[in-house]
Each structure stands twice: as C-alpha cells, then as structure tokens.
Amino acid sequence: MSRFIFAPAARQDLREIQSFIARESVAGARRVMGEIRTACARLAENPHLGHRREDLTDQPVLFWPVRAYFIIYQPETTPLEIVRVLHGARDIPNLL
C-alpha cells in the first residue's frame, strides 16, 4: 500500500478543519476527516490523478477536491507529501 505524509502546514489545516466542523457536528467532522484521508491514500497510489491550478499557483503541486476542500500535494515525492488542505473559499494563492 502506498503511503503519504502531511507537511506541518497540512497537519495544522486538518486540525482547524476538524475543529471548525466539530462545532456543528462531531460525527460530521469525523466523516470529512475520513474522506480526506481516504482521498490521500488514493492519491498516494495514483499521484497524477490531481490537476494543476495555474490560476492559483505556479508551484509544482496538484490539487484534488474533497467536498469544499482541496488536497494540495507534491506528486513526485515518496511518500506522497500533502502540502496543504484548504477550503476552496480561502485565499489559496497567498496561503501557498
């Protein structure tokens, strides 16, 4: 099974996402976190599934949507490095 790691900024993103959603629903927060982890595992097995977003960054990262969030990752790393996990409404260019 392929592996992935979260960069420190991505770990912080996940803590914030979980905390935000859990204010309304702890079960909902668990579901979203599970969906994000499942997507990360899938990306680790198929790292080129994502797509470039040249409108958001010129960095060599790919984006994969999960609900309203983007998993932003380095496709050429082993294990796959998840750089950030950001809500689509955030100012992504300034956060990368």
Image (cartoon, grey):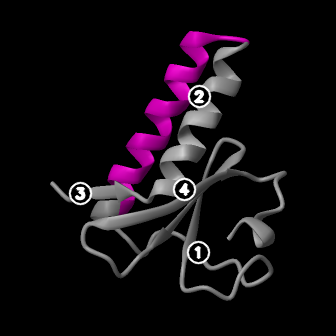
Q: Residue at x 62, y 79 (%)?
A: 52
The one nearer the camera, 4 or 15, is 15
User: Is 46 placed left or right of 55 in the picture?
Assistant: left
Q: Secondary structure at mark 2?
A: helix
How far across and down, in percent of the image, does residue 31 sit?
51, 23
Q: Residue at x 55, y 74 (%)?
A: 62
Among the 4 quarters of the image, the one containing residue 7: bottom left
Q: Could you tell me how far apart the alpha carbons at marks 3 and 2 are, in whole angstroms?
A: 22 Å
Query: Mark 1 belongs to which amino acid?
Result: His
Give residue 9's mark: 4
Quadrant into which the C terminus falls: bottom right
Q: Residue at x 41, y 42 (%)?
A: 37
Please report whichever mark, 2 or 4, sits nearer to the chain's N-terminal start. Answer: 4
For disc 1, the marked residue is 51
* In this rendering, the label closer to the viewer, 1 or 3: 3
Is 12 in the magenta?
no
- Magenta residues (range): 24-43
Quadrant into which the N terminus falls: bottom left
Give residue 75's mark: none
Q: Secondary structure at mark 4?
A: helix
Please report whichever mark, 4 or 1, sits nearer to the chain's N-terminal start. Answer: 4
